[in-house]
Amino acid sequence: MIQEQLELLRSEIPDNVTLIAVSKTKPLSDLQAAYDAGQRHFGENKVQEMVEKAAQLPKDTHWHLIGHLQSNKVKYMAGFVHLIHGVDSLKLLQEIDKQAQKAGRIQDVLLQFHIAQEETKFGLELQEANEILESKAFKQLKCIRICGVMGMASFTSDVQQIANEFQGLKKVFETLKGQYFADATYFKEISMGMSGDYPIAIQNGSTMVRVGSKIFGGR
């Protein structure tokens, strides 16, 4: 079942888009089945769960932390996490930098932006991102690499609204690229789109989609 779902998704998703299998709350056997079907990118939203699973899956698995991240949890995953999607404060960047230094590695992160109309979603506004990127404190960070942006659209059946929100995130990406990362080849990721809206996200420039239920079934 999982293998069939992955094959179906891969047939729909362009080669330049990374499929992240959102495996939160799923048993290890499901992740292993996806791994055996060739899936290497997995997304978790709780650090503890990711740490436990990472210890049991092969080492070439790429782990993505896609949930809201608390500073005090960074140290547990600093040695292995591939990409941290939801970075929304200077304080969090500083803690990630500190733990990455201790682990002797450069940590790739995405800046999370608030693009939905719901208040419950986390994320920066463009002005806040500018303030962080221009700050002296940010310029002192040594082990952080900002690779792009991430956002979550409103939970709505209004396709046009979702498309507009994704277009907004693409504009944020282009603005930051032009202002701060023009020569940075690594600044290339737009993480947007989930099981319900990934086709719209891809149409609007997504380079990473986070898909769970379409692979593993509902909870």
Image: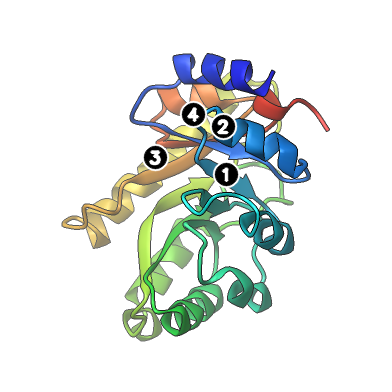
Helix, strand or loop under label 1: strand
Q: Report the residue marked by disc 1.
A: 42
Disc 2 versus disc 3: nearer the observer: 2
Q: Is residue 154 visible?
A: no
Front disc: 1 or 2: 2
Task: Count the marks.
Answer: 4
Name the residue type under label 1. Phe
Examine the image and state in which quarter residue 2 appears: top right
Question: Dot 3: few (<14), some (14–19), or many (≥20) neighbours within 10 Å?
Answer: many
Task: Give the residue pinned by disc 2.
Answer: 36
Question: Looking at the image, is mark 2 or mark 3 earlier in the sequence?
Answer: 2
State the image coordinates of residue 56 (x, y, percent, origin top left).
65, 54
Nearer mark to the viewer, of 4 and 1: 1
Q: Which sits in the foreground, 215 or 174?
A: 215
Q: Is residue 165 above or below residue 9?
A: below
Locate the C terminus and report the quarter of the image it occupies.
Answer: top right
Tell me which colouring the rendered structure shows.
rainbow
- Give yes or no for contact between labels 2 and 3 (Cβ–Cβ under 8 Å): no
Residue at 57%, 22% in the rendered image: 6
In the rendered structure, the answer to whether residue 219 lies left or right of residue 149 reads right
Percent across and percent down for residue 175 are: 31, 50
What whole-number distance in Å separates the C-alpha atoms at marks 4 and 1? 19 Å
Look at discs 3 and 1 and give the one toward the viewer.
Answer: 1
Instruction: Of the two numbered discs 4 and 3 on the same chain, state the one appearing first in sequence.
Output: 3
How many other residues sit within 10 Å of disc 2, few (<14), some (14-19) or many (≥20)? few
Dot placed on the residue nearer the N-terminal end, 3 or 1: 1
Q: What residue is at 53 percent from the left and 17 percent from the top?
A: 7
Q: Quadrant of the N terminus?
A: top right
Q: CA distance from mark 3 to mark 1?
A: 23 Å
Name the amino acid type tagged 3: Lys
